[in-house]
Amino acid sequence: MLGTGILKGMIETARNVAGSYVDAERLTTVEYPEVKLPPKENARSFPFLVFDGDDPHAGLRCVACQICEKECPPQCIYINKSKDKKPDHIGKPQLYPATFDIDVSVCMSCQICVEVCPFEAIKMDQEFELSTSDRFGGLLLTKKELAKSNDYYRRLHPTEAGEIDAKRAEEKAKAEAKAKSDAEAKARAAAEAGAKVEKSPAATPKATTATSSPTQT
């Protein structure tokens, strides 16, 4: 019958409108911004930098390799390397970004920077309320603004963060085991070298004989 589909759609709409007054599951909207729906775990907006511990500088995972800067399609990432180094999570000295800026007015939220990062240092945030009257400086995020704790990352993406934490813990355990093994090997080598020195015979001085010249008469 002509118009049956339209009629069914109108009936379903009317059912949802009437049901929304008595059934919370039929509510299709919320009173934003007073009420906000929680984002999905895989939701993303703009990148941020992850740091471990309580110190954003000491715990920053980024080593200023600049891979994300080179791979970024809109070229919205700006990095300057440091002159000195700091230890990473396994104690290896690494460079760090003296400057790390992201222009979110240009960023297209493609997540390529996250995919190419070999250090799990840059991830996607879910904060999208970034409106500002300053369209230039207000949308240029610096390292201080981008740095967020690993606890924050775990709240946004618990599944992914848990896998990464387990991987990094395993790497740290392997590095500590290797360092301990190397220290023990050096100690054994030093002990063996000392034992060989003690067992070797002491060097004896060469005997010298004095010869007297004949006396002339």
Image (spheres, helix red, strand yellow):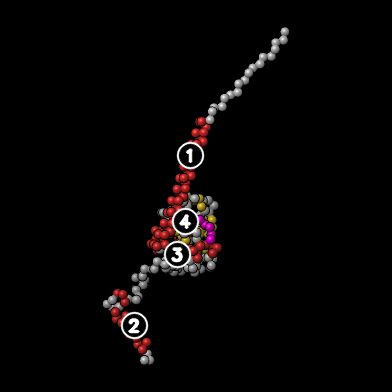
Residue 68 inside the magenta-drawn segment: no
Residue 61: give its label.
4
**Quick one: which residue is furthest to the top in this view?**
217
Q: Which residue is mark 2?
A: 13
Residue 153, compared with residue 195, is above or below; it is below
Which one is in front in this view, the residue at disc 1 or the one at disc 3?
1
What is the crowding at mark 3: few (fewer than 14 residues within 10 Å), some, or many (at least 20)?
many
Locate residue 201 relative to residue 158 in the image: left or right. Answer: right
- Name the image quarter holding the N terminus: bottom left
Residue 138 rendering spot, x and y as whole percentages = 47, 65
Q: Which residue is mark 3?
A: 124
Locate residue 148 relative to residue 14 in the image: left or right. Answer: right
First along the sequence among labels 4 and 3: 4
Please tell me which residue lies in front, 137 or 81: 81
Q: What is the distance, in whole Å, between disc 2 and disc 3 at their CAs? A: 37 Å
Q: Which residues are magenta?
A: 62-67
Residue 61, compared with residue 194, is above or below; it is below
First along the sequence among labels 1 and 3: 3
Q: What is the distance, in whole Å, between disc 4 and disc 1 at their CAs? A: 35 Å
First along the sequence among labels 2 and 3: 2
Residue at (57, 25) in percent of width and height: 204
Q: Which residue is mark 1?
A: 188
